[in-house]
Image (cartoon, rainbow, N blue to C red):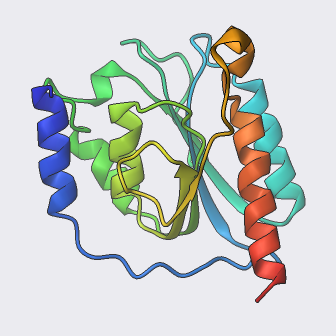
Amino acid sequence: MSLKQRIFDYLRGKQEERDPRFPHLDQPLKIMIIYESDVLERNDNIKSIRQDLLRRQMDVTMWGYVEKKEIQTLILPQSRILGLNDYNLLGKPRDYVLTDLAAEHYDLLIDLTTRPLLPLRYIAMYTDADFKVGLNLGEGLHDMLISLPDFTPEQGEEAAIEASWLYHQIMSYLTTIKSND
């Protein structure tokens, strides 16, 4: 286990116990989406997810991460992409990132991360949200976990999980659970 992972696990253990509140999608919600950005920072699939949520009368903030030093995208109130310079040598987000993150409270965190990326796991951990949902990556940061279907090795690249697929799974579960209240 790497030192960065040990530090993350230690800090995760220091987090206060959460009391999650299930979101009701028929009401306007303040939603945080975190995702792995593409290298060119275009993220067309994430933008279409944002449009879907805006059509549902949701207030959407998106934070992405890309493994490079220089980020070209502007930092906007509703959209931001983090890079290597936003984290210290031990992998923890810099203070200004944590301050910006702590400045807002969200009803729902939708984590569209499809692989265990430590920088986005920190964002998921430190986001102040009533309910957190994401892929089951084994770290216990979310209140609701989505499990992957079983893929066979022959499927190769076709088995890669897309953020849009994960989003539709999450929304399907949230809607189904709500309708059974």
In this rendering, is residue 106 above or below 115? below
**64 left or right of 156 in image:** left
44 vs 76, nearest the viewer: 44
In the picture, the quarter occupied by the C terminus is bottom right
Q: Looking at the rendering, in which quadrant would you find the N terminus? A: top left
Can residue 27 be seen from the camera position used here?
A: no
For the point 54% across and 82% down, the residue is 21
Pick the front one: 149 or 55 = 149
> Compared with residue 67, is residue 12 higher up or lower down, i.e. above or below?
below
The image quarter in which residue 27 lies: bottom right
Q: Is residue 134 above or below residue 91?
A: below
> Do we see residue 50 in this rendering?
yes
Please, is residue 40 above or below residue 30 in the view? above
Q: Which residue: 39% across, 23% down?
A: 83
Q: Position of residue 18 (x, y in %)?
A: 35, 76
Q: How many marks?
A: 0
* Residue 55: image location, x then y, percent: 90, 57
At x 47%, y 21%, the residue is: 66
What x and y, as percent, mark residue 115? 49, 30
Q: Nearer the viewer, residue 45 or 174?
A: 174
Look at 22% across and 55% down and name the residue there: 12
Residue 97 placement, left or right of 67: left
Q: Position of residue 164 (x, y in %)?
A: 76, 36
Q: Residue furthest right?
A: 55
